[in-house]
C-alpha cells in the first residue's frame, strides 16, 4: 500500500511497525522519495484489515490524504521491519 499526505517526519513508520507487531502482522514500511510511505503487510486477514484501517488515519501528527491498496501474494516474510 502507499500512503499519501503529510506522512513523513511524523513517526508514521515507527507507529505502523508497533501497531503491526501488536497485531501479529509481518512486513515492511519505508519512506519513498516522493513523500509517500510504502507498506507491505502479511498476516491474518482481519489483522491486516485493522492495520490498513489504521493507516487511513495514521499517528496523531500525520495528515493522511489517501491510501492506495493493492493485494499481492504473500512472500513469506518472518518479521516486521522499518526500511
Image: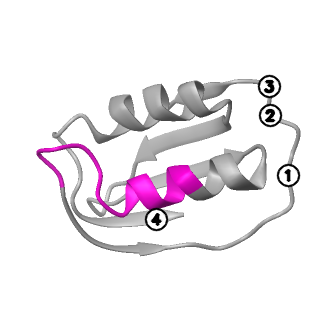
Residue 45 left/right relative to 30: right
Question: How far across and down, in percent of the image, does residue 42 sit?
Answer: 74, 46
- The image quarter in which residue 35 lies: bottom left
Q: Residue 77 got which mark?
A: 2
Viewer-side residue, 18 vs 27: 18
Q: Which residue is mark 1?
A: 74
Q: Report the Cα–Cα distance between label 1 and label 3.
A: 11 Å
Residue drawn where x is 42% and y is 38% of the image: 16
Q: Which residue is mark 4?
A: 2
Residue drawn where x is 48% and y is 55% of the image: 38
- The image quarter in which residue 56 lies: bottom left
The magenta segment is: 50-62
| Residue contact between numbered discs 2 and 3, judged by CB atoms under 8 Å | yes
Viewer-side residue, 6 vs 34: 6
Residue drawn where x is 29% and y is 59% of the image: 57
Residue drawn where x is 65% and y is 46% of the image: 47
Viewer-side residue, 10 vs 45: 45
| Label 2 element class | loop
Amino acid at each position: 500500500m502507499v500512503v499519501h499526505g503529510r506522512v513523513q517526519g511524523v513517526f508514521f513508520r515507527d507507529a505502523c511497525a508497533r501497531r503491526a507487531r501488536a497485531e501479529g502482522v509481518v512486513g515492511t514500511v519505508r519512506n519513498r522519495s516522493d513523500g509517500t510511505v510504502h507498506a507491505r503487510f502479511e498476516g491474518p486477514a482481519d489483522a491486516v484489515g485493522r492495520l490498513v484501517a489504521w493507516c487511513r488515519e495514521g499517528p496523531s501528527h500525520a495528515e493522511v490524504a489517501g491510501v492506495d491498496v493493492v493485494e499481492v501474494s504473500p512472500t513469506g516474510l518472518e518479521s516486521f521491519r522499518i526500511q
